[in-house]
Amino acid sequence: MDRSIPTQKLSPIALHRQLDAIWDAGSGIKRFAAVNHNVIGKRFMVTALVFFAIGGFLGMLIRTQLATASNGFMDAAQYAQVFTMHGTIMMFLFAIPFFEGLSMYLLPKMLGARDLAFPRLSAYGYWCYLFGGSMLIFALVTGIAPDGGWFMYTPLSSSKYSPGINADIWLLGITFVEISAISAAIEIVITIVRMRAPGMSLVRMPIFAWYMLVVGGMMLVGFPPLILGSILLEAERAFDLPFFDPDRGGDPLLWQHLFWLFGHPEVYIIFLPAAGALSTIIPVLARATLTGYEIIIAALMAMAFLSFGLWVHHMYTVGIPHVALSFFSAASALVAIPTSIQIFAWLATLAQGRPQLNVPMLNVIGFFVVFVMGGLTGVMLAMVPFDQQAHDTHFVVAHLHYVLVGGFLFPMLAGLYYWIPHISGRQPAQHLSHAAFWMIFVGFNLTFFMMHLTGLLGMPRRIYAYPEGSPWEWLNLLSSFGSFIMAMGFVLVALDMVLIFIFGKPFRRNPWKAGTLEWAMPTPPPSYSFASIPHISERADNLPIDKLAAELAAGKGYLGFSRNGWMETLGIDAISGEPNQIILLPRPTYLPLFTAIATGGVFVSLLLKLYPVAVIFGLATLGLFLLWTRNPDAKTDRGPLAASSDCRLPLHFESLEAPTILAMRLVLVANATLFASLLFGGLFLWVSNLGPRPKTDLVSTAGDALIIPLAIFAACAGAASGLKKGLYRPMFLASLIAYGLAATLLLVELHGRSTIATSTALNAVEFAVSCYLAFHLGLGLVFAGFGLWRTGEYISDARQNDLRISSLWHGYCLGIVLIAWLYPHLLTTLPPGG
């Protein structure tokens, strides 16, 4: 194998042709196999905008219904479906996926990488997002859409009060979509931590990367509680496990806790990417350096931390103790401080520069006006006495829209007009865009400012009609009038985007005179982004782009050549930014699409109550994931290879800091958060509930006697096999047998306890913990078998990553086995609720 740089020096055009032939995503049906971040990022954004159009249309239906009193435009059932789907689409199918797509498109370019860390994972995440969202839209079209509100509060969403399939579609569809969110979070974090340009230490990262690093971490911790809640509620509806049934010791408040453990951090998960876009755009438009780079980073970390202590902010009226109310009220007010720090930093940047009043800047100004107003009403709602008066009124609806539209939509429009030249290779004409902005801005404020007034006059949320002669009617009519003005503004934006692609003026490079790396390449960008990878010696948002672009196009950087048909990029040390590996990326493949189809089969089978079919699709999904791991390039030791004339690095298969190792750790973080949420649910039900106690002892004798020792041995043997050379095969074989026996015994025991599990909520929790353990023992069996297979050609003294990944899983299994064994004992030592 050639370890040197090719001796023949290529011209920039010849180098481009060689790299383009390697990285090209293909055309026609081959596009379904594309895994390149340019393709996937644009797919996410376009799909999110389509969902936004659907959600906006539903919003128009809502405003038409509420425009006049006693309106017969929709009946209560239709309104409930439209209301639920409007919120669901905007929160789950538009806001977060759009910035996921923008991040996937921009981050490798801003960081100086050629692609994301796991291109196939991002493609799989997109297909899951598309299929899960399509399930919900199909339900809407066929009249079986969810109708319990986008928050699906129990007991309204339980089978007793929602006996149809509507709620199941929401629970399974949203869980399907959340797979995409978790995969995007892993992709974003790993790319930022491991795949920056050499020399780009943490303190040199562009500010947008800091925002997305924090957001990715928040998603990994914030989304699992909702996934768990959806699983538990679907299990209650399908198998009568009474987690939320107060007649059998359950508690509807448990759903609210799990939902808002996700729901309030999600507000900041939506806002922070938009804030990152603003922190990138404002200095460029102001022709100044961003003020307070370090303090902004500290502020966004503080905001992320505080956001996880605010979930009861939405539950002030459910009977929370006064001490807890004081804590959450104070935390809700405190989060205004890091938000204000960022706003003042942006204002200071504008003040010290010479702002250009173009369309992106108009939307930035719109953001300041709308978001600050929303923030002020947020501080009002953080105060318990006011919230108890305004709770569940239109005042809360107005606040939500001012925060989310101000904090997301206006920055989104600013970012869209700022980066559309990069995506299209054409500059906006900026004729329709001015009119569009003013229609959106005026229409929005006319729509939602009136809702503050209707809310203060006592108009409840979620009602579909109100009596004639109500003081709300003229305000609602103005709101509806404003909403149609705003809708026409968005139509103009869509038309303007089409005209830009058709008639926009081409440009050479960097029309904004920005200093970030995404402009140091041709536009539209080639599939490989950079002909060579730069070395960064200063903060990566104020670089000499024109000079750097010419050098990189000529191959005067790292990996400025093609080798063996490989798709190569660099990996670095997380802190210092020193290069430490060459990462080989996968070729285009249909496997992500096929795997997402199999995953969709699982959810559709669960929806139709075809549980044996769901198991078959689940096994097919697992088998397809295992096919992802085949790689002939990972079967040979190669040693250090040339990355530049004076730099030799190992391939990531032979690196101790390979992206896959960190990815496994992040998967376990998300997994542990879900498990902790389940344990919290059991603790909450035990301490707070006066319902019936378990009919049997929570601790199983069979589990103590057989399952636990076998599972502990399996986990220990699997973990040790990754550390002890020469014991790979026998230890993996021993753990394989032990995992198999432990999982089989536990499944037999669970079958015997399935009837008891429906008797009380605490029995159901204990059953759920055992199911979680059984599922992980089953995956431990897979990892043991995987390790046994990989010890053939894929493992050597230099290539140990497969063993490290397996060892991480086995170590996690060891932890949950011990916790699952001790948990019932610990619960029984606590006094019952009362």
Image: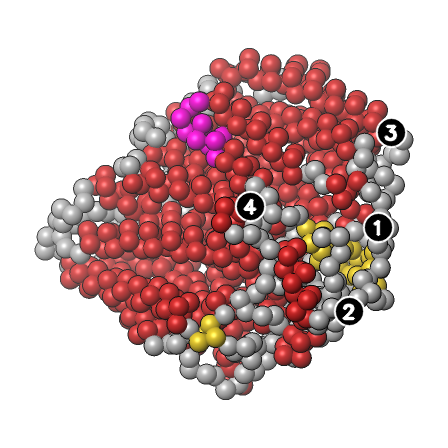
Q: Is residue 605 magenta?
A: yes
> Residue 1 shows which numbered tag?
1
Residue interval drawn in magenta:
600-610
Q: Residues within 10 Å of mark 3 (few under 14, many from 20)?
A: some
CB-based contact (under 8 Å), mark 3 and mark 4: no
Badge 4 marks a residue whose secondary structure is helix
Please say whether residue 297 is visible from this viewpoint: no
Left or right of 541? Residue 507 is left
- The residue type indicated by label 3 comes to Leu
Q: Residue at x 29, y 47 (%)?
A: 83
Badge 2 marks a residue whose secondary structure is loop
Badge 1 marks a residue whose secondary structure is loop
Measured in 3D between alpha carbons, the distance from the residue under mark 1 to the one under mark 3, in whole angstroms, is 30 Å
Instruction: Please state the horizontal and vertical placement of residue 127, each as a whole percent of the image.
Output: 50, 44
Q: Is residue 257 above or below residue 396?
A: above
**Which comes sooner in the sequence, label 3 or label 4?**
4
Tally of marks: 4
Q: Is residue 286 above or below residue 516?
A: below
Residue bearing mark 3: 727
> Residue 9 shows which numbered tag?
2
- The residue type indicated by label 4 comes to Ala
Measured in 3D between alpha carbons, the distance from the residue under mark 4 to the one under mark 1, in whole angstroms, is 29 Å
**Which comes sooner in the sequence, label 3 or label 2?**
2
Q: Residue furthest right?
A: 726
> Residue 130 shows which numbered tag?
none
Q: Residue at x 23, y 51 (%)?
A: 61
